[in-house]
Image (cartoon, grey):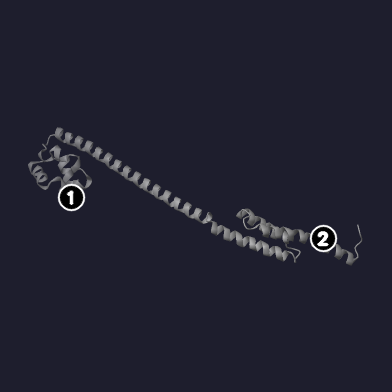
Amino acid sequence: MFHLSLLSAAIWGSLGDRASQLLANIGLANIGLANIGLVNIGLANIGLANIEQSSETRLTLMKALTQRGVQWIAHLFQAMGEQFQRVIATSTQQMQTLEQTWENAIASVIFTPALWQIGLYWLLLLMMVVGFIGSFVPILPGVALVLLAVIIWGVITGFSGIVWPLVVAIVAFVLSIAVDNLAGLIGAQKAGASRW
């Protein structure tokens, strides 16, 4: 508060020889002007220590201080804007890097052949087991499910090394249909069904 009242007395009040001498002796940096940047805007060039008491000199001083203050405020806002732009650019770059990292991680999991082939292998193996059980349990699909699993695996692997299992699955499917039909006919005859 002492610094502001001293500056106020220097600018607005009457400056006697003693006040001029005091300002010259303590320097502008000691009254807090260095902290707000007024030393850098040219108060030393105004000649604050040699101000006369005339209103014209005070008016000139006020104009100079106002002009320099506006310049300082404009410079301050420009510096803040530049700093804000740097922060935005840095955070944008960091977000893009993070996004790219996530995309690479997801792509490496999805497009790694070993991982999805292992999952598909177990799914198709489960389909085959359910199809085998379905041959004995009427609620579940039978050999058709096994054949479907073999065909899907063949499509995925390009039918390399799966030709014989596919042939066996097709033959088993045809035989299961034939046995199912024959079992139905034989069972119907034993139960006393009539011919159509």
10 Å neighbourhood of mark 2: few (<14), some, or many (≥20)?
few
In the rendered view, tell whether residue 45 sits above or below residue 142: above
From what the image shows, is residue 45 above or below residue 102? above
Which of the pair 73/21 is nearer the observer? Answer: 73
Quadrant in which residue 171 is drawn: bottom right
Q: Which mark is residue 2?
A: 1
Q: Amino acid at mark 1?
A: Phe
Q: Nearer the viewer, residue 22 or 53?
A: 22
Quadrant in which the C terminus appears: bottom right
Asked if one can make out residue 152 in the rendered structure from this viewpoint, the answer is yes
Image location of residue 109, percent across then percent down: 51, 56
- Side of 7 relative to 82 (left or right): left
Place of residue 59 in the rendered image (x, y in percent of width and height, measured from the top left): 18, 34
Specify few, some or many for label 1: CA neighbours under 10 Å numbering under 14, 14-19, or 20 or more. Answer: few
Examine the image and state in which quarter residue 170 appears.
Answer: bottom right
Where is residue 104 drawn, in percent x and y?
47, 53
Q: Judge depth for marks 2 and 1 and give the one in front.
A: 2
Label disc, if present, on residue 90 of the rendered structure: none
Give the residue at x 67% y 55%: 151
From the top left corner, tell me how far across and down residue 138 is, in percent.
Answer: 76, 64
Residue drawn 16% across the image and 43% down it: 9
The residue under label 2 is 181
* Dot 2: element: helix
- Looking at the image, which residue is at 86% across and 64% down? 186
Residue 129 placement, left or right of 43: right
CA gap between label 2 and label 1 equals 110 Å
Q: In this image, 174 relative to 29: left or right?
A: right
Q: Residue at position x 36%, y 48% from top?
A: 90
Mark 2: amino acid: Asn
